[in-house]
Amino acid sequence: MQNVFVYGSLKKQEKNHYMMENYFCLSMDAWINGKLYDGFVGYPFLVLDQKSKVYGEIYQVPEKDLDILDEFEDYFPDGDNNLYERVEIDAFTKTSCLKAYVYVCVQTEMLKEEIVFGNWSLVEGERKKDRE
């Protein structure tokens, strides 16, 4: 099993969480060092940064299923035009530090506005209120 940190549409209560429903959630209250940016059409982008935090969840995913997430995240191991790269980072919970994979933005021209609180669910919650 591989730990995967999710911070956007794959989180619980988000539109693509169905992809994570069959995996064990180790922590719903986790964070990594990074900055979160609003991207295009309602998707977040992560850039690693030691001075900021991004909040998310950690799931245990079978090695064989990483290909499914890679395709969803537009990551191809030998690709030279990836939207994201899958990298291993330190992910933190209240009680531990774990190695986990995370998808990091490599096309920085896609970055729009920084999400200063580092929590995509807060942004999506505000958007849902605006649509109602």
Image (cartoon, rainbow, N blue to C red):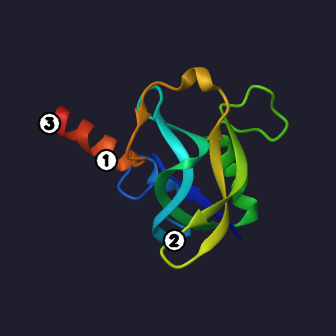
Taking the spot 40% from the left edge, 59% from the top edge, the residue there is 12
Whole-percent x and y of residue 46?
A: 56, 41
Q: Which residue is mark 3?
A: 132
* Quadrant occupied by the C terminus: top left
Compared across the picture, whether 73 is left or right of 19 comes to: right
Q: Which residue is mark 2?
A: 93
Label 3 crowd bin: few (<14), some (14–19), many (20+), radius 10 Å: few
Disc 3 is placed on an element classified as loop
Q: Quadrant of residue 85?
A: top right
Cα distance, mark 3 to mark 2? 34 Å
Q: How many marks?
A: 3
Compared across the picture, whether 98 is left or right of 63 comes to: left
Q: Quadrant of residue 28?
A: bottom left
Amino acid identity at mark 1: Leu
What residue occupies the far right of the structure in this picture?
Answer: 78
What residue occupies the far front of the structure in this picture?
Answer: 51
